[in-house]
Image (cartoon, rainbow, N blue to C red):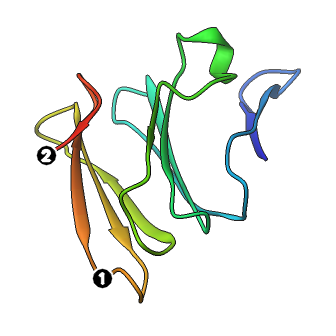
Amino acid sequence: SILNRDLRVKNHFISRIEGHKQEITGLKWSFDDKYLASGGNDNKLMVWSRNHSRLTEPIYKFSSHKAAVKAIAWSPHQSSLLASGGGTADRCIKFYNTQVGVET
């Protein structure tokens, strides 16, 4: 589970996000704070939209890694470009266009 909290407000608990079947290994908000990317030991990369059903369902699920997703980064120059790195059994960096939901 991902517990989404905003410590700037009095009632700081925002939502509980569930989607991964195993431990979550990485989280990264996009630079505009509209999207949250999460990676896990289940070899999945998920993208959640702050504006879509209050983060209850991922807008995209990517499962092309052959090992746990160990690294996540949003491009500072192209807001819809997301990169993820797989673990030892994968050793790949993959790129995704989150505007249309495809691996590039």
Give the number of the disc on residue 49. none
Local SS, label 2: loop
- The image quadrant that residue 102 belongs to is top left
Amino acid type, residue under disc 1 in the picture = Arg
Give the number of the disc on residue 91. 1
Number of numbered discs? 2
Q: Is residue 41 above or below residue 103?
A: below
Give the number of the disc on residue 104. 2
Amino acid type, residue under disc 2 in the picture = Thr
Relative image position of residue 32 (x, y in whole percent): 35, 26
Local SS, label 1: loop
* Label 2 packing within 10 angstroms: few (<14), some (14-19), many (20+): few
Q: Is residue 4 above or below residue 15?
A: below
Relative image position of residue 61 (x, y in whole percent): 47, 39
Q: Residue at x 51, y 64 (%)?
A: 43
Relative image position of residue 76 (x, y in whole percent): 19, 43
Q: Are marks 2 and 1 in contact (CB under 8 Å)?
A: no
* Label 1 packing within 10 angstroms: few (<14), some (14-19), many (20+): some
- Give the distance between the C-alpha atoms of the residues marked 2 and 1, in whole angstroms: 17 Å
Q: Residue furthest right?
A: 11
Q: Is residue 15 above or below residue 21?
A: above
Q: Residue at x 11, y 39 (%)?
A: 77
Q: Residue at x 38, y 36 (%)?
A: 30
Q: Residue at x 88, y 21 (%)?
A: 11
Relative image position of residue 75 (x, y in whole percent): 20, 46
Q: Residue furthest bottom?
A: 88
Q: Is residue 47 above or below residue 70?
A: above
Say whether residue 88 is left or right of residue 52. Answer: left
Query: Going from the N terminus, do you reach mark 2 or mark 1 first?
Result: 1
